[in-house]
């Protein structure tokens, strides 16, 4: 169906199997061959941390259904990544006057910026959909929001959205 895996794949597959859902899968990876053959599923290669890209995809989804049938009922914000490199790893600059290289912020961009972008755009289009009482946004959580993962400090920071 898509490059989605785990929980994201299971939710998308369950919606398709249930019938009556037009499912849109957004992933940073290119669409696999089988993505185009899945019924009622449209694949969008997209970087959710890039607001312009994500806004264009949401608008495309919204306008592709025609002016009489525009609706957005459910968004499952499931994207997430772990720290790409060890935050505590020594760099070549250790022991010199040179500053260390800039940290890799991908985990913050995807897990925090991507979350905010997705919810912000989903709320906008859901507010324009008919029967607003039946709309839902589900966000994947992590135990790192409650119990810090000290070896992954940026991941833990990105999951502490609400207290």
Image (spheres, rainbow, N blue to C red):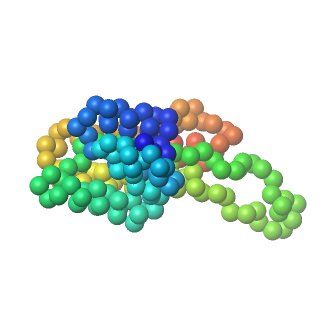
Q: Residue furthest right?
A: 95
Residue 122 placement (x, y as % from top left):
30, 51
The residue nearer to you, when weighing 38 against 12, is 38
The residue at 42%/42% (across/down) is 1
**Residue 82 vs residue 22, the one in the foreground:** 22
- Say if 41 sits above or below 97 in the image: above
Q: Please state if 77 lies on the left or on the right of 5 as rendered.
A: left
Q: Is residue 138 left or right of residue 135?
A: right
The quadrant of the picture occupied by the C terminus is top left
Q: Is residue 156 left or right of residue 26?
A: right
Residue 99 in picture, x, y percent from top left: 77, 66
Q: Is residue 162 visible?
A: no
Who's the residue at 26% across and 40% down the image? 21
Residue found farthest to the bottom: 98
- For image coordinates 56% across by 46% down, the residue present is 81
- Depicted 98 relative to depicted 72: above or below: below
- Image quadrant of residue 140? top left
């Amino acid at each position: 169906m898509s490059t989605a895996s785990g929980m994201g794949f299971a939710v998308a597959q369950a919606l398709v199997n249930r019938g009556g859902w037009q499912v849109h899968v957004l992933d940073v990876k290119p669409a696999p061959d089988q993505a185009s053959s899945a019924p009622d599923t449209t694949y969008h290669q997209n970087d959710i941390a890039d607001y312009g890209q994500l806004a264009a995809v949401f608008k495309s989804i919204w306008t592709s259904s025609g002016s009489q049938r525009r609706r957005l009922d459910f968004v499952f914000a499931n994207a997430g990544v772990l720290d790409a490199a060890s935050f505590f790893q020594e760099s070549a600059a250790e022991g010199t006057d040179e500053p260390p290289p800039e940290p890799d912020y991908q985990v913050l961009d995807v897990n925090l910026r991507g979350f905010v972008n997705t919810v912000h755009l989903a709320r906008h289009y859901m507010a324009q959909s008919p029967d607003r009482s039946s709309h839902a946004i589900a966000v994947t959580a992590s135990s790192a929001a409650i119990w810090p993962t000290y070896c992954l400090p940026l991941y833990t920071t990105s999951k502490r959205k609400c207290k």
